[in-house]
Amino acid sequence: MYESGENYLETILILRQKQGYVRAIDIANELGFTKPSVSRAMGILKNDGYIVVENSGNIVLTEKGSKKAGEVYERHLYITKFLQKTLHIPEELAAQDACRIEHIISQETFARIKENVDGQ
């Protein structure tokens, strides 16, 4: 899966936790994308089995989508904490950097970051 797909899944997960529901316009507003761009991405995620779009327009993560979104979000949280605690990066910058790092980091490096954060 590409970085953009992971970002969409993570955003759906976060919005669902905040609001209890997610529509394409919510994702567009959150990410600063156009509604047509989000609609196209939702079509791809739907075809790949990551989401279901209900008749009401509510976007729901499938089991596969929830698993992937959870993995991405976990990486985001741990990398953010690592950057803050280990390198003393301010929270906002750490979160921005984590958002980019979370997509390219190896499993081995992430496991070490997780151990480091959990051990502190």
Image (cartoon, rainbow, N blue to C red):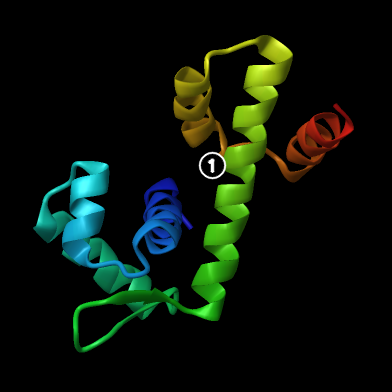
As drawn, is 56 to the left or to the right of 106?
A: left
Count of numbered marks: 1
Q: Which of 45/28 is in front?
A: 28
58 displayed left or right of 72: left
Q: Quadrant of the C terminus?
A: top right
Residue 41 spot, x, y in % from top left: 26, 62
Q: Residue at x 84, y 29 (%)?
A: 116
Q: Is residue 109 above or below residue 87?
A: below
Residue appearing at x 42%, y 59% in the figure: 9
Q: Secondary structure at mark 1?
A: loop
Q: Residue furthest right?
A: 119
User: Residue at 44% of width from left, 47% of height from top?
Assistant: 3
Find the residue positioned furthest to the top. Answer: 88
Image quadrant assignment for residue 109: top right
Q: Is residue 98 above or below residue 69?
A: above
In this view, the residue farthest toward the bottom is 55
Q: Position of residue 42 (x, y in %)?
A: 27, 68
- The image position of residue 63, as x and y in percent, is 55, 79
Residue 21 lies in quadrant = bottom left
Instruction: Inspect the image, locate mark 1, and give the three-letter code of the amino acid beneath it.
Output: His
**Which residue does the numbered mark 1 point to in the structure image?**
103
Q: From the top left corner, tell me how far across and down residue 90 is, in percent.
A: 53, 14
Q: Residue at x 27, y 86 (%)?
A: 54
Q: Residue furthest front?
A: 19
Label 1 crowding class (10 Å Cα cut-off): few <14, some 14-19, many 20+? Answer: some
Q: Quadrant of residue 16?
A: bottom left
Above or below, 105 relative to 50: above
Q: Is residue 29 above or below residue 105?
A: below
